[in-house]
Image (spheres, grey):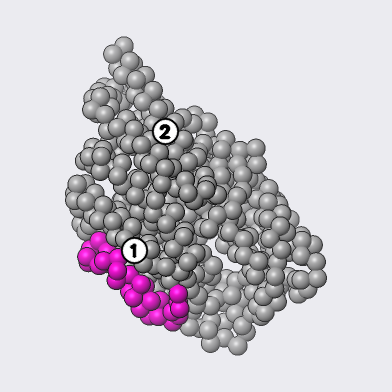
Amino acid sequence: MTTSAENVLQRFNERISQIKSYEEALGVLYWDLRTGAPRNGMEARSEAIGMLSGQMFKLSTDPELGEWLSELERPEVISGLTEIHSRLVTETRKDYDRSIKIPPKLYQEYVVLTSQAESIWEEAKEKNDYAMFEPYLDKIITYTNQFIDLWGPKATRYDTLLDAYEPGMTTAELDRVFGGLREKLVPLAAAIAASPHQPETGFLQQTYAKDAQKQFSLFILEQMGFNFSSGRLDESVHPFATGLNPGDVRITTRYLEGDVTSALFGTIHEGGHALYEQNIMKALIGTTLCTGTSMGIHESQSRFWENIIGRSKPFWSRYYGDLQKQFPNQLDVPVEDFYRATNVVRPSLIRIEADELTYNLHIIIRYEIEKLLFNGGVKASELPAIWNEKYKEYLGVVADNYSDGVLQDVHWSGGAFGYFPSYSLGNMYAAQITDTMEREVPALWEMVGRGELHPIKEWLTDKIYQYGKLRTPSELITSITGKSLDPDYLVAYLERKYKDIYRL
């Protein structure tokens, strides 16, 4: 590499480090905003977030950065770069070309709006007041449509949004995959509903002390391999994970005193995200590759730990006694009954509390609504009615309030349109990865039954976590399983598990 190219690479590295520093600072501000910042400070905090985001955006779209990228992309230069620098150039180019199409002022306005909207959403959900949130959502949709116009619509307008969360994913592919899932899961759900062997769940309807729930959540995180010297658990209205860097990964959960499972499985879910972020290789720290490669792959890890491990029979064979000790005289049923109760299949209103099987229908509903918003021109004012219609059609239930209906998710308040499909994609990735893990680690379920979860984390670190964004989703799934994403693994997993639980 010439001296000139080396100088460009050094300046490029310095700029990436600056951008990453802004990302971390903004991550702390967002986390604080969602975990107890005074409500009266919301407006000023949102303006501060907008200003810092605007500065980061300017750094990310500086023409000088474009010149450096052009220099580093020259064949004789990029061929001499390390794997990390080569990938960093590729990813930065993609982000740069996308971002330079957005005027900085427009972007800053949007960030301020979404920061305000997330706080308004919390209040609106608490008060069951969609009218309070609707004007903000309407503006966010308008801004998002402006962005799509500036980026240039792909095959459909919604495809443009999908690509930001799962590179290369299209509505055509999701229609095919989700159509196949719906075709196979609806008959299975019907057979389960008709089964005379329904799990008893009444014993779960008790009051469970919040402090005891927290202690057990912390215990399970430790068992999973969560590093408390590099992370923390807090409380929020909607559970989330924030990875600032591998040494600072923060997760939250939501405690419901009438439900011992909600916070527990929410914590395990977010803990799966955290394990990914805490175990990225040190060489990627300080770069924009120090994060998950896609939201689908990220969700595969949260769903793997929450459902495939956390809702498994071997897991509860090991940990049910610990849970009983945390709640004396409250869970006086055999472990088999508890296992079946926590895997009951029942149409429900709340996505994050849905069973593994019907959960995918919750995602399909949101996917179809988002397509209507951006491909069909539906307005924010129409969403409550459409939401209820689809819930009645797909799950046979209708919310009698906004909080359990159209206001239940935080995602739209932050402008995260195109994110929801990642959850079902994550389920598919997780099932396919598990199939390979079971073959490569024959004693997998015996290990889970003994509470030996760290080797599982190490296997996943070797296959997924360490690479951060160094490899694409398709490269990862192919390198691990030898195949591209195949939804049949998820169907096979669900059929095997629930036919046993419901004795079909």
- Residue depicted at x 78% and y 73%: 332
Mark 2 Cα-neighbour bin, 10 Å: few <14, some 14–19, many ≥20: some
Circle 1 sits in a helix, a strand or a loop, which is it?
helix
Q: Quadrant of the N terminus?
A: top left
Q: Quadrant of the C terminus?
A: bottom right
Residue 177 rendering spot, x and y as whole percentages: 35, 65
- Residue depicted at x 57% and y 71%: 497
- Which amino acid lies under the numbered mark 2 shown in the image of this protein? Tyr
Q: Closer to the camera, 236 or 296?
A: 236
Give the quarter of the image for residue 412. Answer: bottom left
Instruction: Assign the magenta stretch its main secondary structure.
Output: helix
The residue that disc 2 covers is 22
Q: Closer to the camera, 435 or 343?
A: 343
Residue 308 rendering spot, x and y as whole percentages: 57, 61
- Which amino acid lies under the numbered mark 1 shown in the image of this protein? Glu
Q: Closer to the camera, 296 or 500?
A: 296
Q: Is residue 140 above or below residue 388?
A: above
Residue 142 - label: none
Left or right of residue 406: residue 215: right
Give the quarter of the image for residue 60. Answer: top left
Question: Magenta segment range?
Answer: 373-401
Left or right of residue 259: residue 432: left
Q: Closer to the camera, 236 or 436?
A: 236
Mark 1 Cα-neighbour bin, 10 Å: few <14, some 14–19, many ≥20: many
- Residue depicted at x 70% and y 76%: 203
Question: Would residue 445 be counted in the magenta stretch?
Answer: no
Give the quarter of the image for residue 51. Answer: top left
Left or right of residue 419: residue 305: right
The residue that disc 1 covers is 134
Left or right of residue 107: residue 199: right
Residue 255 rendering spot, x and y as whole percentages: 62, 61
Separation (CA) of disc 1 from disc 2: 30 Å
